[in-house]
Image (cartoon, helix red, strand yellow):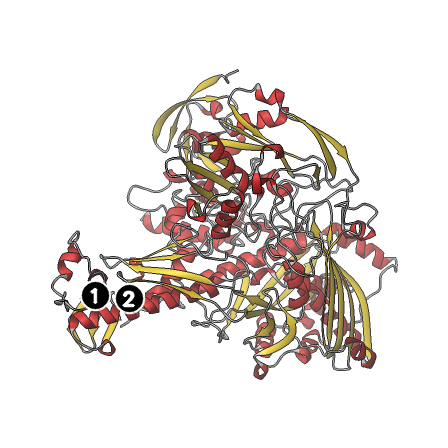
């Protein structure tokens, strides 16, 4: 019987090293080489001009090796950092310098780099460096940026980096024809990825080889490599970048190059000694990226059944001080806002605006949570206005299963048409309603009310474009001992790539799972890749791995057919052995086929010796390697999809509010999720758990509290309320729906971000249901809820209409 | 001027170690930099996340909050010292079985914390398990499977102690 691995909860290959302390994170590297360590002088002001920088006192400290300011940067390294993803609508992009030049635009911007024998000494020195600042007014929050009394960048007086309008259908006509109309505002605060391992960079210059090896805690090793080569004027082949074990990413490490990814390698080259920088937690808060912050204005027109005839959304997206990652987040918000629905007409306009705060780049969900918040709050408002059940209004707006592929008529983040490939939203809705007992909740709520308890239920739906291109690749090589080396270009931050890609190879190639080794994020092994973001690793690299495995198999069967003197069609490859169907005695091990695939076969090992029995006399008149063929049993293949594939899901939650303290407790949290073919349900479930936990964090706990001076007041784990186990419901309930994607060989859709996307919308809806007044801003904490209750009691805010 | 160094003598994972370190060297940096035991991770440097938890004379402590010079004569167990010679400890086995880790960065702190917790309370309820890990942060898992792993580890320990 053939063992199948795809679809099974295969235990992770990664775990053994990670649970025994044998993981290899960037900061674990370089102790043997006595790497020098880096500390930065970072701006204490949100907005200032920089004058003199006095480093004299710092040089007195023994163990200080070098100090760099912007003046010490040369060539491309002295230029502003790149705008990774330009867009015609991003009319006023700005990026930082690797070390600040003339001005600083947020607290935490790096100004001076100190290199010393260790971090303690580097920090001693950094503390002695004096920088003259002429402090300018800070611009904090969307209203201040919009008011534009102060320009963040003086040549952009309106603080607007980008302005984009997309429209499908006639919104004016739709709105005019609609029997009902609503208009309201919504707010989502900032949050951030906050992986347990911050960023880290270790660089080693090899003077004999004029080459650079860099380890970085990144989600995009190949692109960091290209950035370093460009910025440090090195030929690409002389730079290697490795993402070793990475302690979580969640988006913040897809941003690149971070200043440190240029500066640390530069220092290693200049000093001829390995150099390392490991971000501390405060640095991560004030110099790594945030996300989420938006204000939204919504107008909607709808009919008596709740069908949206016109939807008109304007929103303002706080992009922080710079726009190195372009306008991906607001584009995603503006397009993914539509979710599983098909409004009659849709117009969306956004402004991406500057503030003197940390940059904003994708955090798990990347703009989707905000879009879903806008749409799902709209659905609840429509239901309230019409006195309809909230699920009924959603159902009335769904794209139906027979309408796929469904073209939303917009341009998505990948620059391609927003065309949903597959899904079944009505069935999903039935699944989630049954799971949480939507119909039975009314009685539960009424019984609770009799006992003086405040309970509420909420639902939220989303569609997530996953697996955007342009491509990913995979290289698979069978070694002489029959073991299989797999290399992919994108990186892993805990998603279990070494396991799931081995599962695909085991099934596609027909080899034992244990014989497969997967390497990710190492440019020595695979040079072309895009990166791990947008829930794309399984879709993109998984597909590439499948294609490469199929190529290797085809080549193996060809070589084996030649050796066994039979037709390829008569052969099967099972468990690492190629045999003639129905005649297991006529067989050859895959390792021996690997030997035979190379006409040069010195008998270095047993496999090579054994393979000689199969070697047939060569035709002296043909070249040993025929045209179009290559020695070795290996293949390098790429997968490039026409467009993204669209995963979807629905969440529902029951919350209870403490009538005295306004504390919000989540009694039940249910998820139905469709990521197409499940490669490893255990891993997908883990991804959803983690996503939901981050969603709950963003809904109830986490904010980034800036004061009016642009100081981040909660830049530590003592004040940034990242949930412990006690803040997450004891049992997250999960259901899987599988509508395979027609766009890729295995039918996969992405799963990584899904869990986080609708949570704020769901919790807001549930709290609203419990309290009887509207929740328009998230996150919500007991203090904010207490204030709303007081306002409600004083008649300052309206009650929602009672439910049917 | 050169920093004064102090002789720290202690037992780490059963081995006697003696190293000269500056007084301000944290135990976490001492383990990682001076002893090369990089399994202990530093997540926040202010004692909140728990990633750096090690066992000091069997009790869980935050190694980022302790100066190495203060623990001369004591015994430290890090994640590298949890596994018996012939395999994995019950907590390690349970983490693997229950998919209780993703990126693995916080994991060493959970493993040491739970090892000590189960020594105190070998038969925890689910509520006990939650309480046991309530001081450690994990950003990947949503904690669901870590709670399961605590209970599973207790089960494995009970089975193997027979």
CB under 8 Å between callouts 2 and 1?
no
* Label 1 Cα crowd, 10 Å radius (few <14 / some 14-19 / many 20+): few
Badge 1 marks a residue whose secondary structure is loop
Q: Residue at x 65, y 53 (%)?
A: A291
Q: Is residue B133 above or below residue A527?
A: above
Same chain under badges 2 and 1? The reply is yes
> Can see residue A685?
yes
Q: Is residue A95 above or below residue A70?
A: below
Residue found 75% across the figure and 74% down from its top: A383
Could you say which is closer to the camera, residue A108 or residue A250?
A108
Q: Position of residue A396 (x, y in %)?
A: 68, 80
What x and y, as percent, mark residue A357?
70, 45
Residue at the front extreme, as displayed: A621
Tell me the quarter of the picture where residue A670 sits.
bottom right
Q: Chain of mark 1?
A: A
Relative to residue A113, is residue A175 drawn left or right?
right
Residue that sits furthest to the bottom in the current view: A402
> Which residue is the site of mark 1?
A623
Instruction: Give the number of the mark in front: 2 or 1.
Output: 1
- Which residue, given by chain and number where applicable, does mark 2 sit on? A629
Q: Which quadrant of the rendered structure holds the C terminus of chain A?
A: bottom right
Mark positioned earlier in the residue sequence (2 or 1): 1
Determine the CA span between mark 2 and mark 1: 11 Å
Q: Quadrant of the N terminus of chain A?
A: bottom left
Can residue A803 be seen at all in this image of the molecule?
no
Q: Residue at x 58, y 25 (%)?
A: A124
């Amino acid at each position: 019987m053939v063992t199948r691995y795809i679809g099974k909860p295969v235990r992770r290959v990664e775990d053994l090293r990670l649970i025994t302390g044998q993981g290899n994170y960037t900061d674990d590297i370089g102790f043997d080489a006595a790497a020098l360590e880096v500390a930065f002088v970072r701006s204490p002001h949100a907005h200032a001009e920089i004058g003199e920088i006095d480093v004299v006192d710092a040089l007195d400290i023994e163990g200080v090796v070098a100090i760099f300011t912007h003046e010490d940067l040369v060539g491309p390294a002295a230029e502003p950092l790149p705008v990774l993803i330009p867009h015609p609508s991003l009319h006023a992009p700005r990026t930082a310098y690797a070390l600040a030049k003339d001005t600083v635009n947020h607290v935490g911007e790096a100004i001076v780099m100190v290199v010393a024998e260790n971090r303690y000494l580097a920090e001693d020195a950094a503390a002695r460096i004096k920088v003259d600042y002429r402090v300018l007014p800070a611009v904090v929050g969307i209203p201040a940026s919009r008011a534009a009394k102060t320009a963040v960048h003086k040549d952009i007086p309106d603080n607007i980096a980008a302005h984009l309008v997309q429209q499908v259908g006639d919104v004016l006509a739709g709105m005019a024809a609609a029997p009902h109309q609503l208009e309201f505002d919504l707010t989502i605060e900032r949050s951030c990825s906050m992986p347990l391992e911050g960023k880290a960079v270790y660089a080693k210059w090899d003077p004999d080889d004029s080459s650079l090896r860099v380890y970085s805690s990144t989600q995009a090793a190949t692109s960091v490599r290209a950035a370093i080569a460009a910025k440090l004027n090195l030929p690409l082949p002389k730079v290697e970048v490795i993402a070793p074990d990475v302690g979580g990413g969640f988006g913040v490490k897809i941003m690149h190059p971070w200043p440190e990814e240029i500066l640390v390698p530069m220092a290693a080259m200049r000093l001829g000694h390995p150099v390392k920088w490991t971000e501390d937690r405060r640095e991560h808060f004030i110099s790594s990226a945030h996300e989420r912050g938006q204000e939204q204005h919504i107008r909607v027109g709808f009919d008596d059944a709740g069908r949206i005839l016109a939807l008109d959304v304007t929103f303002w997206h706080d992009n922080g001080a710079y726009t190195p990652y372009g306008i991906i987040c607001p584009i995603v918000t503006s397009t993914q806002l539509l979710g599983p629905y098909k409004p009659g007409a849709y117009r969306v306009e956004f402004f991406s605006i500057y503030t003197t705060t940390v940059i904003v780049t994708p955090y798990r969900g990347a703009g989707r949570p905000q879009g879903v918040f806008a749409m799902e709050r709209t659905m609840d408002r429509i239901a309230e206005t019409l006195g309809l059940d909230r699920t009924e209004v959603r159902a009335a707006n769904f794209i139906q299963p027979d309408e796929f592929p469904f073209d939303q008529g917009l341009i998505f983040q990948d620059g391609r048409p927003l065309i949903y490939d597959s899904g079944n939203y009505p069935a999903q809705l039935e699944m989630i309603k049954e799971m949480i007992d939507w119909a039975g909740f009314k009685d539960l709520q009424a019984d609770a009310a009799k006992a003086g308890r405040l309970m509420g239920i909420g639902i939220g739906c989303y569609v997530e474009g996953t697996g955007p291109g342009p491509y990913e690749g995979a290289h698979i090589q069978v070694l002489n001992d029959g073991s299989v080396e797999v290399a992919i270009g994108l990186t892993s931050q805990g998603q279990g790539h070494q396991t799931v890609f081995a599962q695909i190879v085991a099934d596609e190639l027909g080899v034992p799972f244990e014989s497969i080794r997967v390497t990710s994020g190492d440019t020595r092994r695979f040079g072309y890749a895009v990166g791990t973001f947008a829930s794309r690793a399984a879709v993109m690299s998984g597909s590439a791995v499948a294609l490469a495995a199929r190529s290797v198999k085809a080549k193996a069967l060809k070589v084996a057919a030649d050796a066994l003197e039979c037709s390829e069609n008569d052969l099967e490859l099972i468990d690492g052995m190629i045999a003639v169907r129905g005649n297991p005695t006529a067989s050859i091990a895959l390792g021996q086929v690997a030997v035979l695939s190379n006409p040069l076969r010195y008998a270095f090992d047993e496999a090579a010796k054994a393979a000689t029995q199969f070697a047939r006399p060569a035709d002296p008149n043909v070249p040993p390697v025929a045209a179009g063929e290559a020695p070795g049993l290996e293949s390098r293949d790429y997968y490039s999809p026409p467009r993204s594939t669209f995963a979807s899901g629905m969440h529902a939650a029951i919350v209870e509010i403490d009538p005295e303290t306004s504390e919000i407790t989540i009694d039940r949290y249910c998820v139905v999720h469709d990521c197409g073919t499940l490669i490893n349900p255990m891993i997908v479930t883990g991804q959803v758990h983690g996503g939901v936990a981050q969603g709950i964090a963003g809904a109830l706990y986490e904010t980034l509290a800036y004061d009016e001076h642009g100081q981040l007041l909660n830049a530590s784990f003592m004040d940034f309320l990242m949930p412990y186990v006690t803040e997450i419901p004891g049992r997250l309930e999960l259901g899987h729906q599988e509508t395979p994607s027609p766009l890729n060989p295995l039918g996969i859709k992405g799963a990584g971000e899904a869990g986080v996307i609708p949570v704020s919308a769901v919790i807001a809806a549930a709290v609203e249901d419990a309290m009887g007044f509207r929740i328009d801003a998230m996150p919500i904490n007991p203090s904010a809820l207490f204030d709303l209750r007081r306002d409600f009691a004083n008649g300052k805010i309206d009650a929602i209409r009672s439910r049917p | 001027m050169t920093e004064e160094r102090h002789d720290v003598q202690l037992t780490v994972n059963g081995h006697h170690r003696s190293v000269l370190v500056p007084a301000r060297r944290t135990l976490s940096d001492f383990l990682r930099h001076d002893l090369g035991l990089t399994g202990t991770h530093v997540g926040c440097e202010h004692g909140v996340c728990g990633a750096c938890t090690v066992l000091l004379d069997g009790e869980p402590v935050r190694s980022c909050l302790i100066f190495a010079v203060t623990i001369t004569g004591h015994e430290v167990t890090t994640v590298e010292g949890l596994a018996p010679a012939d395999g994995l400890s019950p907590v390690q086995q349970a983490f693997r079985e229950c998919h209780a880790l993703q990126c693995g960065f916080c994991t060493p702190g959970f493993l040491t914390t739970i090892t000590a917790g189960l020594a105190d309370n070998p038969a925890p309820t689910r509520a006990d398990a939650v309480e046991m890990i309530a001081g450690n942060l994990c950003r990947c898992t949503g904690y669901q499977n870590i709670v399961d792993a605590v209970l599973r580890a207790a089960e494995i320990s009970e089975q193997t102690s027979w």
